[in-house]
Image: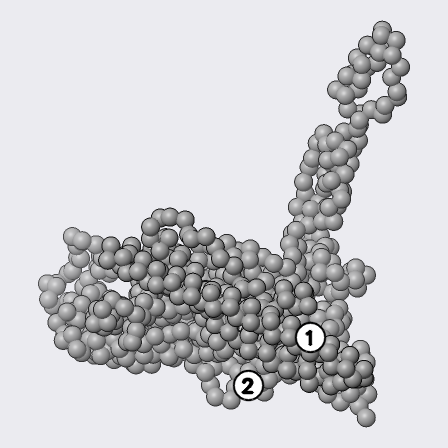
Amino acid sequence: MAKKVTDIELRGIINSEINNALGYMGGALSNSRKKSLEYYMGEKLGTEIDGRSQVVSTDVADTIETILPNLLRIFTSSERVCKCEPVKAEDVKLAEQVTNYINYIFNKDNNGFSILYTWFKDALLEKNGIIKVYWDESQSVEQETYQNLSDDEYKLLVEDDNVEVVQEESFEDETAKAQMEVVKAIAVKTGEIMPEMPIPMLHNVIIKRTSGSGKVKIENIPPEEFLIQRTAKSIDDANFVAHRVTKTRSELLEMGFDPKIVADLPTSNNILLNNERLQRYSDIDETPFNDAPDHSTEEIELFECYIRVDTDGDGIAELRKITVAGMGGYTILENMACDNMPFCSITPIPMAHRFYGRSVAELVEDVQLVKSTVMRQLLDNMYLTNNNRVAIMDGMVNLDDLLTSRPGGVVRTKQPPSQVMMPMQNQTISQQAFPLLEYLDTVRETRTGVTRYSQGLDAKSLNKTATGVNTLMSQSQMRMELVARVFAETGIKDLFKRIFELTCKYQDKERIVELNNQFVPIKPTEWKNRYNVTITVGLGAGSKDQQIVILNNILERQLQAFQLQGGQEFPMVSLKNIYNSLTKIVENAGLKNVENYFVNPDQGKQMVQPKPEPKPTPIEKIEFTRIASEEKRKLAELELEAKKLKADTAASILGFETKIKEMELKYNTQIDAAKIKADAELEKLVTSNRNKTFLAVQQSSDKLDQQVSNLDGQQPIEQRPTQPTQPGTEPSEQG
């Protein structure tokens, strides 16, 4: 049987996992990302020679900055980054509300565009982009000052649970005191006895108000701060994942950790001295060292670890969140169970069976290196060509004059210049260099899909056929869309699933937000146990302009079919189909709110008032009157028959009751009362069926009377009893 892990053993396990994690202390991964940063920032190659060209090509930066806008446009052209599709018919409204709210959380509660920008750029440049999504319970504290508060105002203020009194001053209300003195003086003159009343007090108060009820927090994680198990294929199947960050002692205390433990934690500059971090800040004047003079602002290295370990001794590893700080032995600050790891990752070029993929920068680094080398040699050759070396006869040329190159300068010679000076011609390499540079650009375009046509840099494109240019553009778009699809399926979908789950789990209060230009109450508690909402990220084929053209063609066909239907919905096209096409056109055009341009047919039908029934013609009025007269005649006949039936029924019942009494008197014993009662019930049943027929005719006649009265604008005919008197009631009572 497994035994429970002790704190000492747990610290050893965490120490081992941190040291063996990818990206902890340098290594090939860290060096590769540092190299990509150097190429992106156009750093020198390290092969520079004084006096020679030191130009550096910027292919890595150019490629990334071209891809990035296209990706962002795909995901941010609409307010809905993702869409929740219901699995069951009864979840349609729920899915629509969830879609709007989780997009609201992403775009409004968090800066969605900034998050995507940083996330995508990290992935394109440094293999993988990492974000952290979690429920933030941190609250904001504001200091407020109030003066001259009355007792009631003061009491109302301090009774708030979110208010803490920092400073307080109470004093007598001089105005009220003076008024009371005047009243007392008047009372003395009039001989009245005034009761003693306390002087009202005023209060000056300084308070701290705590606000905030928790929200979903999304933040970008620098790649060097993320650690993961070496053999992990994804975040979900990893046994160890950690977020390495620095916190001040003050921040640790605000997080609720033990002040005694925090005071003894050693400081660390490991993160600040990381090669990637240093390279990221290499072009600005900032010192990475922690030289805070205040003890409370000293920075501590903190590891927020998510590890699968058997802490209870049942033999099954559980996922736990363990926060440690310090160096070497690490001090455990927090140990708690958790449901999942709060990280999402994307990579533009996934590598099978491993976590880290390849960046776009890696594909272009060697191209940038070769282009930089060729450009330097080409420029050096041009410099030498424009400033040729000269061979001279020693002692026959003034060297100072020769070395001083200026317009109109004179070079003194002792012999004719042609006899003592001879220029040395350099062979130009431009004929070989420029085709090589063109070839390198083609290699870059083939690897990345970023063509000069997509960049708008080819001046000769106007002389090329439209078909050929469109083919090249389509191939480039396919590469872009592949990267976008990979991002959507591997990272963005996970992000919005976590937003949905966190909202359902932690938001226990109703929240009113503006969705689709309407203020809507949101109750995520109603979403619990309804995880049948599928998160999908919609990406269409082709560019936005192409999609608009296709949608316009579809809309034209829909309108034609709608006209063939005589302007009626179904069987081919409905108003909802036309509205869906218009919605997509508006979204692809980059406009945010579709409701500003078109009304949803489902909502429009509710707003439209029903048309009044058309007034009947004079001929129809005459016909209705004739039918009403006929119905009245039939009704009178039925009433006469009903009265006759009523009398016959009453006589029959009376006869039955008389026979029963006679039999009881005759035999003076118990008789078969059940049989006699059954016979009576049979007779009642026959009578009831006749009355039902009479009631149906009567209701039909009343309805017709009402129609005629409405046509003539008169009061309806005198109401008759809606139900006939039950036959046999009066005779039964008499009997």
Question: Residue tagged by mark 1?
Answer: 658
Asked if labels 2 and 1 touch by Cβ distance under 8 angstroms, the answer is: no
Q: Give the residue displayed 77% in from the left and 21% down from the top.
A: 176
Question: Residue 233 bears which disc, if any?
Answer: 2
Q: Give the residue displayed 85% in from the left and 7% down from the top.
A: 190
How far apart marks 1 and 2 lie (CA) works out to 98 Å
Which of the 4 image quadrants contains residue 478?
Answer: bottom left
Which sits in the foreground, 48 or 18?
18
Q: Give the residue displayed 21% in from the left and 65% down from the top.
A: 387
Label 1 environment density (alpha carbons within 10 Å; few <14, some 14–19, many ≥20) = few
Image coordinates of residue 199 in percent, x first then y, are 82, 24
Q: Give the residue displayed 33% in from the left and 81% down from the top.
A: 447
Which of the 4 image quadrants contains residue 466?
Answer: bottom left
Front label number (1 vs 2): 1
Amino acid beneath label 1 = Thr
Side of 575 relative to 188 (left or right): left
Q: Is residue 564 visible?
A: yes
